[in-house]
Image (tube, coloured by chain):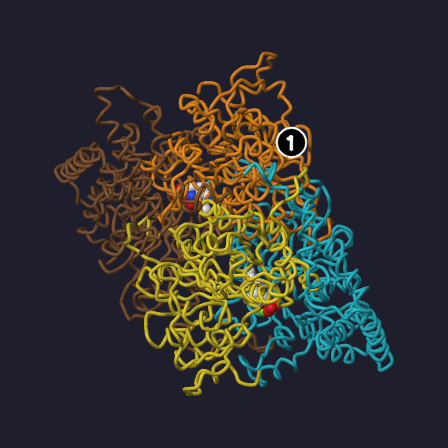
Chain colours: A orange, B yellow, C cyan, D brown
Amino acid sequence: MSTTTADAGRTATAVPKPASMAQALNRALRDALAEDPAVHVLGEDVGTLGGVFRITDGLTAEFGETRCTDTPLAEAGILGTAVGMAMYGLRPVVEMQFDAFAYPSFEQLVSHVSRMRNRTRGGLPMPITVRVPYGGGIGGVEHHSDSSEAYYVATPGLHVVTPATVADAYGLLRAAIASDDPVIFMEPKRLYWGKDTWDPEAPAEVPGIGEAVVRRSGSSATLVTYGPSLPVCMAAAEAAREEGWDLEVVDLRSLVPFDEETVIASVRRTGRAVIVHEAAGFGGPGGEIAARVTERCFHYLEAPVLRVTGFDVPYPPPMLEKHHLPGVDRVLDAVARLQWESEWVEGGGR
Amino acid sequence: MSTTTADAGRTATAVPKPASMAQALNRALRDALAEDPAVHVLGEDVGTLGGVFRITDGLTAEFGETRCTDTPLAEAGILGTAVGMAMYGLRPVVEMQFDAFAYPSFEQLVSHVSRMRNRTRGGLPMPITVRVPYGGGIGGVEHHSDSSEAYYVATPGLHVVTPATVADAYGLLRAAIASDDPVIFMEPKRLYWGKDTWDPEAPAEVPGIGEAVVRRSGSSATLVTYGPSLPVCMAAAEAAREEGWDLEVVDLRSLVPFDEETVIASVRRTGRAVIVHEAAGFGGPGGEIAARVTERCFHYLEAPVLRVTGFDVPYPPPMLEKHHLPGVDRVLDAVARLQWESEWVEGGGR
Amino acid sequence: MTVLEQPGTYRLSPPPAWRPRREPGPLLPDAEPYRLLGTDAELDPELLLRLHRALVHGRRYNQQATALTRQGRLAVYPSSTGQEACEIGAALVLQERDWLFPSYRDTLAAVARGLDPVEVLSLLRGDWHSGYDPRATRVAPLCTPLATQLPHAVGLAHAARLRGDDVVALAMVGDGGTSEGDFHEALNFAAVWQAPVVFLVQNNGFAISVPLAKQTAAPSLAHKGVGYGMPGRLVDGNDAPAVHAVLSEAVERARSGGGPTLVEAVTYRVEAHTNADDATRYRGDDEVATWREHDPITLLERELRARDLLDDTTQERATREAEEMAAALRGRMNQDPELEPMDLFTDVYEQQTAQLREQAARLRAELAAEAAEAAGTAGQGATGHGEQTGHRQQAQGEQGEQGPQGAAR
Amino acid sequence: MTVLEQPGTYRLSPPPAWRPRREPGPLLPDAEPYRLLGTDAELDPELLLRLHRALVHGRRYNQQATALTRQGRLAVYPSSTGQEACEIGAALVLQERDWLFPSYRDTLAAVARGLDPVEVLSLLRGDWHSGYDPRATRVAPLCTPLATQLPHAVGLAHAARLRGDDVVALAMVGDGGTSEGDFHEALNFAAVWQAPVVFLVQNNGFAISVPLAKQTAAPSLAHKGVGYGMPGRLVDGNDAPAVHAVLSEAVERARSGGGPTLVEAVTYRVEAHTNADDATRYRGDDEVATWREHDPITLLERELRARDLLDDTTQERATREAEEMAAALRGRMNQDPELEPMDLFTDVYEQQTAQLREQAARLRAELAAEAAEAAGTAGQGATGHGEQTGHRQQAQGEQGEQGPQGAAR
Ligand SMILES: Cc1ncc(C[n+]2csc(CCOP(=O)(O)OP(=O)(O)O)c2C)c(N)n1
Ligand SMILES: Cc1ncc(C[n+]2csc(CCOP(=O)(O)OP(=O)(O)O)c2C)c(N)n1
Ligand SMILES: [Mg+2]
Ligand SMILES: [Mg+2]
């Protein structure tokens, strides 16, 4: 990359041009800082360095050290002080350096951030955005590729949002920062550098937090997905045409709130569904989605809802990750298992 | 209670007599300490006090301070030092004082305990038992009644075990301590003091970790449950007779490994299922179970698998908890929604 | 000036030119806890009498709250009997605009700050989590997970400073709580940011049953300050004017930009950990007796008498007022609190999610059914899990949402 | 004797009789980092030469590993160039039975301990997580989550002591890592249990881009020791014999039951954080240049020359041996590692769960299909996501498991 994120943002232009998700996120932070003096960015290396993924590039230079602050190296401390800042009316945007490095802040998140509004009867809302770069596929070594969303999804009081497009990266991050509720904003690392046509000077409006979007219409079956698995599903849908399947792809965009209506409408239409995510299957978000879809679409379903997910193992080392990550083939295999033949063989045990 | 736990254990007798889950757990720890010098109990107040629930009562007196040790007040430190002890060949049994107070140790659990065996190719197994008193219904104030199992279930590499009977409390805890894998041993607080006929001198063998048990046979529908919700389901099954339903109740006993075969066999037999747990529904273990059961029982099912769970809210204050906890009525309501009429009304939207 | 505002000054030089980044000497606590009672220090009589009255009230409040547990009016009460000088000191040194961050043991500090005692006791009564409005009272919710409120205090103090407000945060924690990682991270952030915050450690000798020496091997807890570059101060926690003086100085330092202070108050938890605890399991009466002789009220009264500041009338008045306060509290706590089950669903999010709306509707229906049943009960005697066939009947309307047509299958 | 073995000695007495629980003085670090080079201390010539050879090797190892990242042979490499004296010192002071707990930056310490460098580099190469057997080598897995390995070291040292084994654990952490809660909890446990463990903090001035003064306001990191009741020692981390001496003494104290020590070695990270980092974003060349003049190898060679212990021949031999080591490493690292995708499922649990068996079977089938396809590819040129209709066909056999009979619906 020769243009830095900051440069790209500063160049005024009316013509939409390719931008990366990293650039859109940077721009969202910049615009939020500029518009609202209550917004403060804090985290490890977010200042001079601009973050290890350069998402905060240029912010300290532009807004000063007190608006974009390098903290001591302690995630519970970062989130805990953010709670205090929010108590005083600020809107902290916290960066966790990697998925697995958010774990030290888990107690603050579960015991305080998620409950503060409720326990104080609305007295202390927590307008905190926690940015968590997550997922694999970037060749990261151990502890750098976790898909940790299941933990957040199971915690009442949090919003869990994850963009899969450049425009959503901007729009959803702005919405997260503007939200008076705590938002876990999960950034799919491997989509950081993918470019899309997007005009940083006129960022298009996107649907808000809690609205799923049908990224591709289809009639044979629905792929329900989010974040890093959206491109996989789009590619699978493309490839499926060769096999005669016309797949619909729903991008959830936020896991909490969960847009049940959009998903259910799609599955009722197609009668079949596969849920795709990178997080381990067992106990992952896919189970919840499958259960919910099934409950409300039972008699519309031609086959059980299937899931294609990461295996139920610790995230593997980079040289093996391709075997772990749900790819196009695995998605198509699952689609194939959606009982397309009208008669089906009587099953024995496994 | 006039007999203390320790007394009850020491009184030799051949006749089975009532014992509480707390007594059985205490006995299991005592027997494990006596049989294997590698077993060490550690936690906050586990020594002289015998733990706030008295589960470790008398252990320090009997085995000395180095076998049952009061640690400094730091859960990450407790679990982290247990990791080191396990690396040296010991078998630590860690007590977390309450569910929510295990959160500070979350990073050690996820980043180390659950992965150590895998990352070292079996070189460093983690025979650690983490005892977590969990769940509500005991009038506990904020942060004392969490059902945190969803977090553990979503973490590959951990076993998640939870007894619902006195005999299981003993048998499963012994099995957990004997396991070379890390076990999150979740103790349903509100069952601690319930008594059952159980002979502490001849603790009956119970099925091992990973085996579910059918606690009540029935033909109309299956209730799938575990831990604190087992008694609720048993009572519901009893009450359901009056409404003409003959319910089967499956006690999972361990969430990981998950005994798919027992559950699936039951649901295939009955054709209907309700999953009952206290943890919040959204992202809770019930979604996983429902998804899995549906996947493998799809054409056997007369109705979608339903769930009865805690609401998706922070655990409420004690005076309101009865409204939150899944009770007999809510279970029966769900059973009633299992589409018993052969014709069913065409549905509109919600 | 915070380090944030002085870029460039923070580099280590290579060892030949190495020097400590600040002088450690002034950060270390004195060799003995600071004490005023029994010395001939000049003391403000008005302050002494104010402290006395507050201590007497505080003691009575503790007794009354403990009594309320026996009557089933509180779920649990962690008493601060014997530690009143710390609780009162913390409350009195703060200005109205300052913030207090109490732990679960510090209801007395909140009450002494002027909060409604019934609201303060909500958590322990069990009708809600935080019974008062933190922004209105500038008292953070009573905090149960140990030491977790300390970083909140730092963040709030930092935020106030960034906004140019003259606000100090005072955070309370126990000796046991100092072992938690959050204690460490909070103190470190506070010192690096030079946040206007005061940490008050009440070293009452125990964390439930665990005595101090199993908690730390440090010379004192105040010695932890130097590791953060923060002054550590040691004070006799049963010497009310000393606690007041040390905390006042720390608050003043914080307010004037001098950064955070760690104060260790050496005191003793005279009662059991809570009403549910059995302290005889882990300590003897002798130890308790020794400390009872060092009781904060006794010590202060001795001093007041010695200085001719307290006569029987004044003493009796304090006692009488305390009795009145206790009676009022008792009276109000003997009322059943008003409960609203639907509150389960309010304030989980700013706007209820669709899922929560649905769950709320379900609970509302249940409550309505229960109410209807209760209304009918007098005549019919039905109890238990609702009417016999109620479940079957009730479910009819809800079915069929899962499919287009029965025949379609 | 650990505190566990002395019940009764640990009570606080009321303030009138208060005294520090141990004398703070001896716990505090000296005012300056300990230094041997450039002094006229008596030094063991053999040790000096051993250190020199190890430093030269270590530097070359760092360079080679960094070069391997450019060739795509390592996913990432965090170099310890400039910090070799600390890495080597840590390795050399340990007995075979002792344990080393390295962070991700400390591959050199593991290599200097005698481990196979290719195995040590597994994590950073990406073929597996820990490439060596920790029990066989008594080196814990390289640890990425900061400071989290410190409590492991404490637990292991404690366990060894309980078993009566004469084992010391040495744990390494960076200046940034000292801010984490786990650092605090580990040091506290170690001191309370008097565990035979040594904590070596390599203060290299930065945590990635964050300089020390944004990390702590303490006089030095060694000053943190007193807050745990543990001696804090400060050493010039670029003075190899000084590092060796201070660590030896600490290891000796631990071994003889004297408890843990916190050692801060003041050093500098001369290279970027890793090959992926751009250090010019946060520091100037001047600072780096200053520190390069204080290079551990230069300093040691100057001393050796001054003491007539190093001639050109010896120096050349060290360089030549280092080159040989580097060439061998290069050669081996240029081989593709053998990968076994099915390893994903081994050692997750002692026994595979039913779910994992099923998932393993699925991957095995995929691999077989891929292999078959690859075998056929040469002739047919098929690529992409398998054969065109492969998915439809393949799925046939697996269906029907979900129901008793199609007709039954
Ligand atoms: C994180 C956490 N772990 C454990 C507990 C359970 N617990 C409640 S009070 C207490 C002891 C606290 O001791 P200390 O900090 O000295 O305060 P004190 O009770 O003496 O006021 C413990 C272990 C808790 N509340 N939070
Ligand atoms: C818990 C955790 N948080 C964040 C990170 C990301 N990270 C990796 S290295 C690093 C800086 C470490 O600095 P320091 O401890 O001084 O060690 P050094 O790199 O200088 O050797 C950070 C923030 C991590 N590895 N673990
Ligand atoms: Mg205490
Ligand atoms: Mg560093």
Please give left or right for residue C340 compared with residue C224 in the image. Answer: right
Picture quarter with the C terminus of chain B:
top right
Q: Residue at x 63, y 21 (%)?
A: A204
Does the rendering let one see residue B240? yes
Please give left or right for residue A1 compared with residue B178 in the image. Answer: right
User: Residue D273: where, in percent of width, then height?
Assistant: 39, 36
Within the image, what quadrant is residue C316 found in?
Answer: bottom right
Q: Residue at x 69, y 32 (%)?
A: A36
Please give left or right for residue D155 compared with residue C111 in the image. Answer: left
Mark 1 sits on what residue? Answer: A208
- Tell which subunit mark 1 falls on: A
Please give left or right for residue A33 compared with residue C370 in the image. Answer: left
Query: So how many labels did they put on this image?
Result: 1
Does the rendering let one see residue A74? no
User: Residue C313: where, in percent of width, then height?
Assistant: 87, 80
Q: Residue at x 48, y 24 (%)?
A: A246
Within the image, what quadrant is residue A160 found in?
Answer: top right
Q: Amino acid at mark 1?
A: Gly
For label 1, the SS is: loop
